[in-house]
Image (tube, helix red, strand yellow):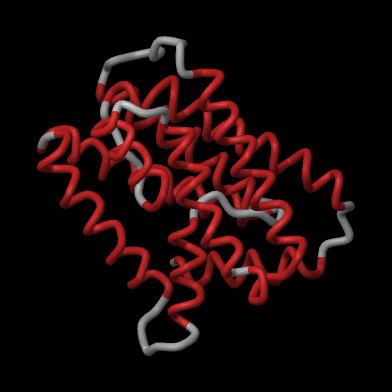
Amino acid sequence: MYRRRVKYYIDYSRTSDMSFYKRGCFVFFGSSLVALSLQLFLVKNLVIDGGIIGISIILSHVTSQEVSLFLLLLNTPFFLIAYSFLGKRFLILSVFAIVVLSLETYILEPFPVLTNNPILVIILGGIALGLGVGITIRFGGCLDGTEVLAILFSKRSPFSIGQYVLLFNIFIFGSSIFIIGLNEAVYSLATFLVAYKTIDFSIQAH
């Protein structure tokens, strides 16, 4: 699934005639959806996503620091490493996406969650998260450094992108059991699955 998704993204981003500025508008919209999902559904309900976003939520919970700080700090090195693989446009759009995500999660921090119902949090939060990430990927950017890392590792080993992403997230969700609790970890896994199904749909939709 992940290999197909990343291949589609690379091919689409290299062949589309869409202007850079129009891409930037879509990336802004996608990043904004992710910020809304994080602050209005997930973070305050102790529901985490996979990848750097999930790690950022866990670190924010442990240290009581803003999640936006960790999103910016943890993602930036991965995109700098990926510059030679996916190019200058990818780097610019991805850094832009991370900056937008970090700023908007900071701005939305004082707002209360829209619901505490676990089912609604999983469905609505997962769909908003997946749609936002999918739109960002489809139009040439990326919001999560672990996906970039998985692409680079898969090129130099017999393991697939999906296997690396799965490995990263097993560690993240496993660790979250001891930090935020078993129920929250299960809710997080369910949200992760909803989000990634939505990512596939939003990237491949015409």
Q: Position of residue 169 (x, y in %)?
A: 29, 57
Q: Is residue 196 left or right of residue 108?
A: left
Q: Is residue 47 left or right of residue 114?
A: left
Q: Is residue 110 left or right of residue 8?
A: left
Q: Is residue 135 left or right of residue 195?
A: right
Residue at the spot 43% in from the left edge and 50% down from the top edge: 197
Q: How many marks?
A: 0
Q: Position of residue 116 (x, y in %)?
A: 28, 15
Q: Give 156 or 10, whichever is nearer the viewer.
A: 156
Res 83 quadrant in image: bottom right
Residue at the spot 52% in from the left edge and 70% down from the top edge: 4
Which quarter shows the N terminus? Answer: bottom left
The correct choice, above or below, for 22 with respect to 164 in the image is: above
Q: Position of residue 73 (x, y in %)?
A: 49, 47
Residue at the spot 45% in from the left edge and 11% down from the top edge: 110
Residue at the spot 61% in from the left edge and 38% down from the top edge: 31
The correct choice, above or below, for 96 with respect to 153 in the image is: above
Q: Position of residue 104 (x, y in %)?
A: 58, 26
Res 114 quadrant in image: top left
